[in-house]
Amino acid sequence: MKAQDLRLEDLLESDSRGGTMRFAGNRVLLFDAVALGLLRAQLVENFGVDATRALITQFGFSHGWCTAESLEHALAWDTPREWRIAGGRVHRLQGLVRFEPVPRERSGVVAEAIWNESYEAEQHILHLGLSDQPVCWSLAGYASGYLSRATGKNVYAVEESCRGKGDATCQMVAKTREDWGDEIEPLLRYYEKDCLEPSLRGLRDSVKQLEARLASQKHAIGADQRFVDNGGIVARSKVMVDVMDLARRVAAVDSSVLITGESGVGKERIAQFIHDTSPRAAGPFVAVNCGALPEQLLESELFGHVRGAFTGASSDRPGLFEAATGGTLLLDEIGDMPLPLQVRLLRVLQEREVRRLGENRTRRVDVRILAATHRDLRRAVERGEFREDLLFRINVLQIAIPALRQRPDDIVPLARLKLHDFAQRFGKDAEGFTPAAQRYMMEQPWRGNVRELHNAVERAVALSDRGPIDVGDLQLPGKSAPTGGGAAAANVEASLEEVERQHILAVLEHVGGNRADAARSLGIGTATLYRKLKKYKS
């Protein structure tokens, strides 16, 4: 057989029932190119470009070497040369690249080719953008491995041009170690295992730093906390401990989750915790605020688009559903999503496939959906602002995060944690809070919840000179300090009933008149709230 006569059906065997496929006698697997592109992006993010290049190059070398060994005796070659030059043809049959040999006019060249439609250049540009160096690492490794096995010499394939760095084509030239001379020296490290050691050592150092930071945080907020994690979640109150226990259980399954709570309570942090403790933790965590983007831009962000789909769409772009494949997608403030997009979202959740804007074909996605909102979605359904079928789809499991004023035991530990973080950032000594400052924080309503508390502590650390943080450091300009004794101390003449009335009306105003939200914030039933409001009007 001649190399040019190779056909896929000569090499590929598949069981009609599925399960196994074999190529030249060896078991092979099918992988989605986008998934490999996402893997590359995650490796670069975690280990750096050099270590990722070494890892992928060595993988490609092993792939090429094993392929050459399999093909040597799998087919009846006309001559040994046909087996040696078959690597490029096999490269093409495997869908990796379209291989076009270039006549060898330079001395010492083992092989030379133009690589068209390189999957690596395509995926690198898609997920990481243009590079300042060639990016077809596994293809170069494959060619090096195949040719090394076929010739019995150390052969290295090098890209002289690459689409991944903006060139018109990808062009490869392969020579032996001797013929390359000193020119190959800088690239040899990508074929050596030691190239990975600096990145692995850096990763170990990062883990140690993270462990030290966690230990320091726990010391800063006190040893009696029942829960603290690196994301800034603190749970000392029973109600918050229950929330975290529920989040742990929810993380173990793959169902959709609706996370509710007022603005600033930490819905995204809970979503991140669910992802980090789930079987999808190794995949990406992607968050998008559905209320922060115009409808067309949000549609493009979620589902992606193809070139020419709308003005300004100069290239194909995957959406966040594709980017989050294998991981978790958080749809924050989903209650603000326009109704037309809710229809498209419902279809994606039902079919588990997306269609980019301007494209006819669909793409399978494997994503866990978390949704978050500060709105009462059932009321929104009644008002025709949210689809009921979409609510059923996202509300398989629900986690309601209480407002900070409903868990006062968490206020001071949270403040201590952020005091420690901000003191490190600003290079100041963290000496804690005075007793008066702690009382002051416990007495505040914190309408902005944890976010407002964090802002107050950051302002206090930034403006304080030295010593523990006092009441004056925490106060906003023009806001008087409490005289002691709690919220009622502001008017010692008021009756308990009057204090209750003022508090209920203040909460109702804060939630924009939404009585269901007010009842939930107050910890009473809606019917009880209606009776009290009716009494106040009489």
Image (spheres, helix red, strand yellow):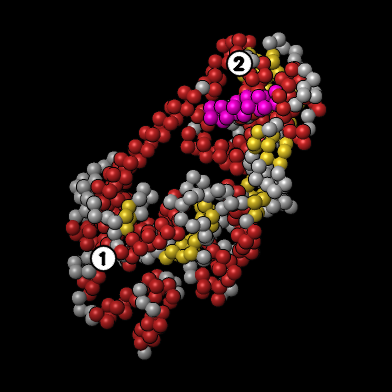
Per the image, label 1 sits on a secondary structure element best described as helix
Quarter of the rendering containing residue 438: bottom left
Q: Main secondary structure of the magenta part?
A: helix
The amino acid sitting under disc 2 is Asn
Whether the magenta-drawn stretch holds residue 71 is answered as yes
Please tell me how crowded label 1 is: few (under 14), some (14-19), or many (20+) other residues with Cα within 10 Å: some
Residues 434 and 240: in front is: 240
Q: Give the side of residue 124 with respect to residue 83, left or right.
A: left
For residue 443, the mark is 1
Q: Which mark is residue 154?
A: 2
537 and 477: which is toward the camera: 537
Percent coordinates x, y for residue 296 in the rendering: 63, 56
Q: Is residue 43 left or right of residue 61?
A: left
Q: Position of residue 254 (x, y in %)?
A: 51, 57
- Residue drawn at x 35%, y 50% is 229
**Which numbered disc, 2 or 1, marks the residue that appears first in the sequence?**
2
Magenta segment, which residues? Answer: 53-72
